[in-house]
Each structure stands twice: as C-alpha cells, then as structure tokens.
Amino acid sequence: MARHRSWRLILSGYLIWLLAGALLVGCGATVQRRASAPSRAPAGFPAGRASTSTVPAPVSAWVLGAMPLPRRPDGFGVVRATPPALVNRRLTAVDQLPPPTSNSFVSTISPVPPRVLARSSWKPACPVRSDQLRYLTMSFRGFDARAHTGEMLVNADVAQAVVGVFKRLFAAGFPIEEMRITPEAALNLPPTGDGNNTEAFVCHQAHGQTRWSAHAYGLAIDLNPFDNPYVKGDLVVPELASSYLNRGWLRSGMALDGGPAVTAFESAGWTWGGRWPGPVDFMHFSVDGR
C-alpha cells in the first residue's frame, strides 16, 4: 500500500471513512453477526459451506493506509468492525513491477540484488544472512482476473518450492491482491488494519514472543492477510478484517480447507496456520509449522 500520501489524499480518505461510518450504522449489526466473536470463532468455523447471507453493498472506493488506528496496550491497533467497502474485498492490484507480457505464468529466482535488499527489512542482526535469501518475481492473478508481477524474498532452500506453489495458484485462478517486499520503515508505522500484502521474508519476532518469527528466516508466507486474518482472543490482525472470521461465507482470496491455496502449500509439505488450535492464523503457511 502507498506509505506517503499528500494532505489532499489523506483528506479524501477521511471523507471516505466518514461515509463508510455512516453506512456502517445501517449494516454494522449484519457484519457482526457474520463475524463470530473472536474469542470463540476459531473452534467452530465451518470450512467449505457456502453462506446464504445477503452481501452488503460496498462503498465505491477505499484509500489504503489513510486512517491509522489507535493502539491497544499490546501495540496492535484497536479492532473495529469491517467497513462496508472491505466486507467483500475485491480491490484491484496496483502494479509495482511491469505486468507479464503473456497470460502464462512467469517467474525468476536470483540472489537478492543490493537495491532490493536495501529496500527490504533485512539488517545484519537478522537470523539469516542476505546470501541465504533469494529474490523471486512471479506472476499472480489479481482480483481483476488479470496477470500481474509480484516480488518476494524467501530462504534459498525453499525458493523452487515456493515458485511451484504460486504456479499452481496462478493456474487455478486463485486471486492475490498484491505481492511486494515490505521495507523496514513500514514495520514501525501506525497500524491501519487494512493491509493485504502477500509476503514471505520480514525480519521481525513472533507475535508476543522474543524468538524470531519463521518469516525472519524466509520460511513462512502470509497469503492475502485481510482475507485470512490472525485471531487470538479479542485480537484480529489485520484489525479491520473481522468480517473474514466467518469462514463459512466464501469469498475470493480465502484460504480454505480443501481449497486451492491450502492444497498447493500442503502438497509442497508446508503447514497451514488455519489448523492451529490457537491462536489461529489463516494467512500463515510455513515449512516448520510455526
């Protein structure tokens, strides 16, 4: 998502937020019925049963990253009901790299170029050396059904397997909103709760722990985080994604038991965080199960 906005753009985002809030008054109760209470939802999620609930009409636009959330004592943003524009999220990918010239899957694997490493979250204190990472570019299918080019840093040991997984997702038409490398500066920005970036290597510690996350080794991938949130007690991450706690209401981009995403990763020997007893991490796929 864009990190630097003009005051005019921020103002427009604020006005859109006000409009979304007004609409939410009328449909907020419906959204909350669909999103089971976070502390109880994971154990009872249906996995693959279509919902017959009426889809609320979204507003026409959403400005990503424009509305920082107040922080909770644990450092995350305050969890809020999903705005109508994001309840059935189908935002069009914004091309960061030139899109493929054909409709076929295209990928590259290379050592990490210095210019790419410089705009990543890698630093010497990370638990993996830079030469142990690989820079991937891969075709992905956006929510607009068109082919886009994404980028990712992964551990060299899993680079080929990761490309194979995303080749399967591309062939299946599984939509991904964006796939880009997160810079270190972005890790300290105020939470906005609306991110949906598919990524692998991020040099940070595991939630609420002192050990390194599997992401810090390039051995885990978060897939469409907004469509597949992390939930622990009353915490939902991203913080506006509560609507997607209802795993029985099938929407594009969701990782579901028996669906193309879970099948592709598990066929490669990866573990899905959606099977964890708690906290449940629907976005998370990893080599070592953590």
Image: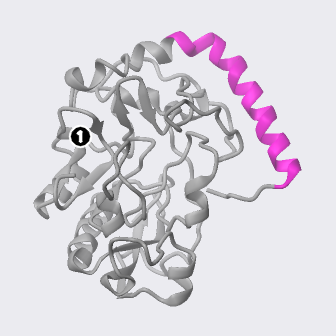
Q: Nearer the viewer, residue 266 or 71?
A: 71
Which residue extends farthest right? 8
The x and y percentages for residue 278 are 23, 32
Q: Which residues are magenta?
A: 6-29
Residue 135 in view in this figure: yes
100 versus 218 height, above or below: below
Q: Residue at 82% across / 49% down in the picture? A: 9
Position of residue 14 in the picture relative to residue 21 (left or right): right
Q: Amino acid at mark 1?
A: Gly
Position of residue 178 in the picture relative to residue 248 (left or right): right
Q: Nearer the viewer, residue 155 or 168?
A: 155
Q: Residues within 10 Å of mark 1 (few under 14, many from 20)?
A: many
What colouring style does the render use? Answer: one colour
Residue 173 in view in this figure: no
The x and y percentages for residue 258 are 16, 43
Quadrant for the N terminus, please.
bottom right
Queried whether the magenta region covers residue 278, the answer comes back as no
Magenta stretch, overall SS: helix
171 versus 108 height, above or below: above
The x and y percentages for residue 177 are 48, 54
Position of residue 136 in the picture relative to residue 55 (left or right): left
Residue that numbered label 1 is attached to = 274
